[in-house]
Structure formats: C-alpha cells, structure tokens
Image (tube, grey):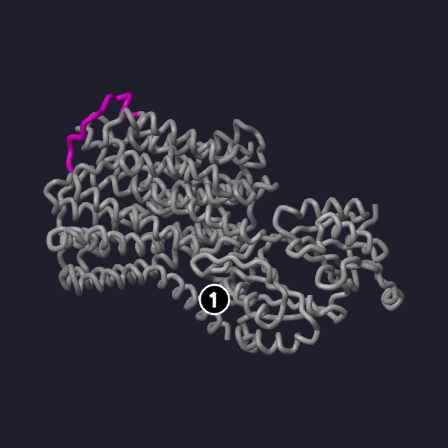
C-alpha cells in the first residue's frame, strides 16, 4: 500500500516533467525525419539526452523544492528581520556575489570575453566584476522590497542607465553583456533568488507582499549588463578580436556522455558549493534548524546536485549538437524556413527550462491560483518563439541590427510597466532572466550559431550572442501584455 | 437567488492541486452560485518518502454554498468526477450553515432559539470578498465589537464573473475572512460588514454564519 502511494506520486511527477520536455523532443524528431536529417547517431544521442533531461529535471525540481527553496526563504526572512539598511545591503551583496561567481556558465563566458578582448581582460577580473554587479543588484532588490519602492520605476531607471551605457559600447559588447546576464541566472541561482525575494516579502507582509515576491531575478540579471558595459568603457574596448571556439563534432553514441559526465559532476558541485557553505554558516548562527529539517534541506541540495548534473549532461551531450546541426542544415537546404522553424523551436524549448517551472509554481502559490501556470507558459512560449524567429531574420538580413529589436522592445517593456498590474511587472522581468536558462541558452544558441555559420553574410560571434539578448527581452513584453489582457478582462467583468 | 428560505450547507472538498477549478466548474453546472478555492499543503508519510526527505503535496481546498437539496447530487457527481471513493484522490465533507447573506435575505436577524441547546456562546462568521477589501471587513467588524479575524488568500468566482484567456478561466483573487464572534454580537457584526461592503449588490461578496460547538483561546477585552 505504502509503496503504491509512493509509486503513484513518483509517476505523477514524472508525467508532469515529461510533458514539459516531450514537446521539444517530438518536434526535433519530426524535423529530423522531414526537412533536416541529422544522422542516426546524433538522433539516438538526442533521444538518450531527452531521457537524461527528463529524469534530471524531475530530481532537480524535487531538490529545489525541499532544498534551495527553503534555504532562500529562510535567508530572506533572516535578512529582513535584521531590519537594518547596512546589514540588508551587505548580506544581499554577499549572497549575490558568491552564488554568481561559482556559476559555470559565467566561467565559460569569462573565457570567451578574455579571448574576445585579445587578452586585455583576464577571466578572473570578469568573474569578479560580474559577481559584484549581481551582488549590488541583489542588495538593491532586497532594499526595494523593504522600502516599498515601485518595481516599474526601479526597472525604468536601471534600463535607462543601461541604455546610456549601451549607446557608448560597441555592438559586440552589447551582445556579450546581455549574454552574461543570461549566464548568471542559471538553473540553481534563479530558484534561490526567487525564494530569497519571496522570503523577504512574506516577512514584510502588507498589501504589496504579493507583487513584492517577484522582480529579484530581473534585477539580478541586470547586474552583469552593467558590469560588463562599464568595464568595456573603462578599459576602452571597442573591437572584438577573438572568434568562437572551433566546433568539434561529436562521434559515437555513448562517448559524448562519458566525456560530459565527469566534467559536469565537477561543475555542478562548484555551482552548489557556495550555497552549501552559506547555508551551514547561516544555520550555525541564525536558523538553528533541528536535525530533521536540516537533513531535509541537505538532502534537497544533494538531489539538486544529482538532478542538475543529469540535466546538464543531457543538454550538453544530447541537445547542443542537434541544435547546431538543425540550424546549419536548414540554413543550407531551406533558408527561408529558418524563421518558421526558429519559431517552433522557441515555443517548445522554454517549457523544458528548469527555472521556468519554479517561477510558474511560485506565481500560482503567491496568487492562490489566480494566475495559472498554463497562462504564463503560453505567453512565455509565444515570446521566446518570436525572439528566436526574429533572430533568424536578423542572421539572414545583415542590415537588421540587434538594437533594432532591443531598443523598441525594452522601451515597450518600460512603457507597459506603468500600465499593467504591478505583479505582472515583477513576473515579466523575472521571466526574462528565467527564460535564458541552461536549456534555452544552450539549444537556441547552438541553433543560431549553426545557422550563422552556414550563412555567409552572418557573423557567428555577434549573431550568436544576440539571440540570448532577444530571449531575455521578449518575455518582458509578452508577460506584460498578458497582464494588460488580465486587467482589461477584469475591468469588463466588473461592469 | 434561487433558493430563498431553504436550508443551506457549506460543501468542502480537498483535492490535488489543479483540480479546484474543475470542481468549481462542476459545482456551477450542478446549480451552485459560485465557489472559492484556496491553497494548502498535504503531507503524505510513507517510509519511502521519509527516507527521501519531507514530501508535501500541493492541495486545493474548494468550498461552495449550496441548497441542502443539492447535497446528495453533489456528493454523487463529485465522487464520480474525482474518484473520491478511492483512497488518496481527495476528500469531501459538508456542514450546515446557520445563515447566509446575499444568497438569502439582506439583513441578518439573529435567531436565539438555539441558545440553551448548547452552551457555547460563539458563532463563526465567514466573509468572502474581493482581494484587497479584507481590511474594510476587519474594520467594520471591529467597529461592531469583533475582537479580531483571520484572512485566507484564495480565488473564486460567482455567476457574474466569467473571463477567459486562452480558453482558461480567470478566477479573481479573493480574501476569506474568518471571525469568531459572540452570539449576541453576530447580528451587528454581520450587518456592519454587509453595509460597509454594500453586500446586497451582486458580486460584492458573501457572508455566512456557522455554529461553533467549542472554542479555545478566545478572550474578551
């Protein structure tokens, strides 16, 4: 009987997770049998990858639920309880700094920028600068909640400063800085920052506690943009001299997995390490949890580690190359279809993003089910679909520049933030950070680079980076438009 | 208001997360005016789950007010739809209401006949209003002699409210306010809240009163 109940719950969870990964799997299989044959070996590897992603995502979410979430909530509450500006700022900064500096994606990016700057900027400098950027923004985010400053004004100010900086940096660094923001809001940091903001707003309570629960991720992901742009201006960098790492196709079915495993086991542990240490320190000094609760959280961290590793192995060994092969294949045989296929891929890929899951569940919880997960997912899917589709157009048409999309997009987002219910502003900006997570970033980036590689007029480096910027921008508009519709519907119903 | 003068009951069901909206839809098909849903967590304890770590399952609690005559039909249909006759699919229960404002008359007049039958001198007042107005409710209640109240965050809809997005119904957010009041004060508290919220107008919320058989922890000022 007991075993049956347990199995039942497990199957339910597995079904839920499968439903978010299967769309991308099915779409890729259909495409590979119709317009872009990707080779049997790659296809089998992709299917194995999907299984890894499903199992990994399931375990990760369970771990996030009992480990990262509670840690974030507890830390948020503890920080808010200090009720002192300097303590809140310092603790917020420390948390933001340490969870960012360990992010593996950021380390890869740092290496790329190091190459791109011709070695002028060392990787470690980039790591530190970006982490400082996130630390400052997390501190600002916490203070904002405690002092009840409206989110739309804070975001308008933040993006206005970014605009001023952005005008002065080269297009290459514009793309890199936005990409850095995608890299820092990874699978592990996002649930943590979400939970942190939730903890603070719950403790503060009051009329605005619902809308205060969101926006932290959005603010945190603006940090790296600031940081990299400022750095490129101070160092006077304009040109990018490096190039994208040469792409070495994988061979064999199991080989890539065997290579990815040890590396990602190591990377994931580095990602989780700061949080683990911070938890132990906070627990010793502040939380003083009983043994049972502490064990549950530690178990949660262990599951997060296992889940994250499996997930990333699946994505890196199974998905990345397929993304690239599809982009290249379509660009060669049916270039006209790139925007269409991009649209479809964008629509389904975001569903398999771990942090999207965490965000939408928090939305449901905070609004008591008023804003349903499915509604957010539909808006987000359409937003990402549009982002990928437009990026394909940009790769095909050299005269279309990245800022032709980003500037009106961010301007529209800022405008909408004064028109929609405040909770949607927070959810929208958080979604921007969440959507550019490990799945989308890897798969869509590979797809774009593949396409750019096959199209002679495109620049692999610039066009590749720009995709992430688009993916981070469109949710701001999509979710706020959703908020506008909610508002209009609610009004009509009132009459 | 279809069932003036009848006995009303509060029908409650605790279901897995995501099924609350279905229950609301079904109950409206069965003749309920509306319903309210709020979130909860249920913990399942099995040996396996204990080894893995605490495991709580998100639940939705659905409540609606219906005529006593509908009760059998409700149990029948709900049980069929959510397979409540099998374990772990959810539970349902119902309680008699003493009075409901806005489904029945517009002014509450206390009936003291039940006093003496049991010795408890408290009643529970439930107020379900749009989110954000719970402050008004508590204020009005306090002005009429209430000593406090508890707000639960939920969502729900009545027949007036039907907005859809991507074919998914949008259920407005609600606050459920629970107040325990002395029997002799109930009348004035209910009427004070009713007046403040203009509750006789449609879509402004509902108030209902239930008997309480025992209390603990309540003190008079």
* Residue sitting farthest toward the right: B116
Q: Residue at x 44, y 70 (%)?
A: A7
SS majority, magenta:
loop
Question: Is residue A411 shown to the viewer in this render?
Answer: yes
Few, some or many C-alpha atoms within 10 Å of disc 1 (few <14, some 14-19, many ≥20)?
few
| Quarter residue A120 falls in | top left
Return the x and y of residue B70 as percentages of the image width and height: 66, 75
Indicate the position of residue B27 as horizontal and vertical percent values. Answer: 59, 69
Badge count:
1
The residue positioned 84% from the left and 59% from the top of the image is B121
Is B164 rendered above or below residue A420?
below
Corner quadrant of residue A200: top right
| Residue under the point 41% across and 36% down | A414
Q: Quadrant of residue A396?
A: top left
**In the rendering, at what x and y percent does residue B124 appear?**
75, 58
Chain name for mark 1: B
- Image-based side of A333 in relation to A226, left or right: left
Q: For the residue labelled by badge 1, is the local secondary structure a helix, a strand or a loop?
A: helix
Residue under numbered circle 1: B48
Horizontally, is A432 left or right of A177 in the view?
right
Percent from the top left, x then y, of residue A325?
16, 54
User: Magenta span covers which residues?
Assistant: A231-244
The image shows residue A207, relative to residue A39, as above or below, that is above
């Amino acid at each position: 009987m007991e075993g049956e109940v347990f199995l039942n719950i497990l199957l339910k969870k597995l079904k839920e997770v499968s439903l978010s990964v299967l769309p991308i799997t099915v779409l890729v299989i259909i495409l590979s049998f119709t317009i872009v044959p990707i080779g049997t070996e790659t296809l089998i590897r992709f299917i194995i990858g999907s299984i890894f992603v499903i199992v990994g995502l399931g375990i990760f979410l369970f771990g996030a639920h009992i480990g990262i979430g509670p840690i974030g909530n507890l830390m948020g509450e503890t920080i808010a309880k200090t009720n002192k500006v300097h303590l809140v700022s310092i603790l917020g900064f420390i948390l933001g700094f340490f969870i960012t500096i360990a992010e593996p994606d950021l380390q890869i990016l740092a290496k790329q920028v190091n190459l791109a700057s011709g070695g002028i900027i060392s990787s470690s400098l980039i790591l530190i600068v970006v982490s400082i950027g996130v630390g400052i923004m997390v501190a600002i985010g916490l203070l904002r909640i405690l002092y009840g400053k409206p989110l739309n004004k804070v975001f308008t100010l933040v993006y206005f400063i970014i605009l001023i900086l952005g005008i002065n940096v080269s297009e290459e660094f514009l793309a890199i800085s936005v990409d850095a923001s995608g890299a820092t809001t990874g699978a592990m940091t996002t649930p943590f920052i979400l939970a942190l903001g939730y903890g603070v707003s719950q403790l503060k309570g009051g009329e605005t506690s619902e809308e205060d629960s969101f926006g932290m991720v959005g603010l945190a992901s603006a940090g790296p943009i600031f940081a990299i742009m400022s750095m490129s201006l101070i160092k006077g960098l304009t040109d990018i001299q490096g190039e994208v790492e040469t792409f070495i196709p994988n061979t064999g079915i199991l080989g890539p997995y065997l290579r990815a495993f040890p590396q990602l086991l190591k990377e994931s542990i580095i990602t989780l390490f700061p949080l683990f240490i911070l938890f132990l320190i906070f627990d010793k000094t502040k939380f003083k949890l009983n043994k049972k609760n502490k064990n549950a959280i530690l178990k949660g961290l262990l599951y997060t580690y296992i889940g994250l590793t499996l997930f990333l192995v699946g994505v890196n060994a199974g998905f990345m190359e397929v993304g690239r092969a599809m982009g290249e294949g379509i660009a060669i045989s049916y270039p006209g279809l790139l925007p269409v296929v991009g649209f479809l891929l964008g629509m389904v890929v975001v569903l398999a993003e771990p942090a999207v899951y965490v965000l939408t569940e928090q939305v449901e919880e905070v609004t008591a089910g008023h804003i349903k997960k499915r509604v957010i997912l539909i808006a987000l899917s359409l937003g990402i679909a549009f982002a990928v589709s437009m990026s394909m157009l940009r790769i095909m048409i050299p005269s279309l520049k990245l800022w032709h999309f980003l500037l009106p997009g961010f301007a529209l987002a800022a405008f909408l933030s004064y028109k929609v219910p405040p909770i949607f502003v927070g959810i929208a900006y958080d979604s921007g950070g969440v959507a550019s997570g490990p799945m989308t970033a890897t798969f869509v980036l590979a797809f774009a680079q593949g396409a750019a590689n096959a199209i002679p007029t495109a620049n692999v480096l610039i066009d590749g980076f720009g995709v992430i910027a688009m993916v981070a921008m469109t949710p701001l508009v999509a979710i706020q438009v959703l908020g506008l519709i909610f508002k209009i519907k609610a009004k009509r119903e009132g009459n | 208001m279809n069932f003036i003068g009848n006995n009303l009951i509060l029908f409650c069901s605790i279901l897995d997360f995501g099924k609350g909206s279905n229950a609301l839809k079904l109950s409206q098909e069965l003749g309920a005016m509306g319903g309210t849903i709020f979130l909860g967590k249920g913990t399942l304890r099995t040996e396996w789950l204990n080894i893995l770590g605490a495991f709580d399952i998100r639940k939705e609690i659905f409540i609606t007010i219906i005529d006593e005559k509908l009760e059998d039909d409700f149990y029948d249909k709900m049980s069929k739809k959510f397979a409540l006759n099998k374990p772990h699919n959810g539970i349902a229960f119902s309680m008699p209401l003493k009075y409901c404002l806005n489904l029945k008359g517009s002014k509450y007049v206390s009936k003291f006949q039940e006093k003496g039958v049991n010795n408890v001198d408290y009643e529970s007042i439930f107020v379900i209003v749009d989110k954000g107005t719970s402050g008004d409710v508590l204020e009005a209640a306090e002005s009429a002699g209430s000593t406090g109240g508890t707000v639960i965050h939920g969502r729900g809809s009545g027949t007036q409210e039907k907005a859809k997005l991507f074919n998914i119904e949008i259920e407005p957010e609600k606050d459920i306010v629970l107040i325990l009041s002395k029997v002799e004060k109930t009348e004035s508290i209910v009427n004070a809240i009713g007046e403040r919220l203009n509750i006789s107008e449609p879509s402004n919320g509902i108030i209902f009163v239930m008997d309480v058989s025992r209390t603990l922890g309540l003190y008079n000022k």
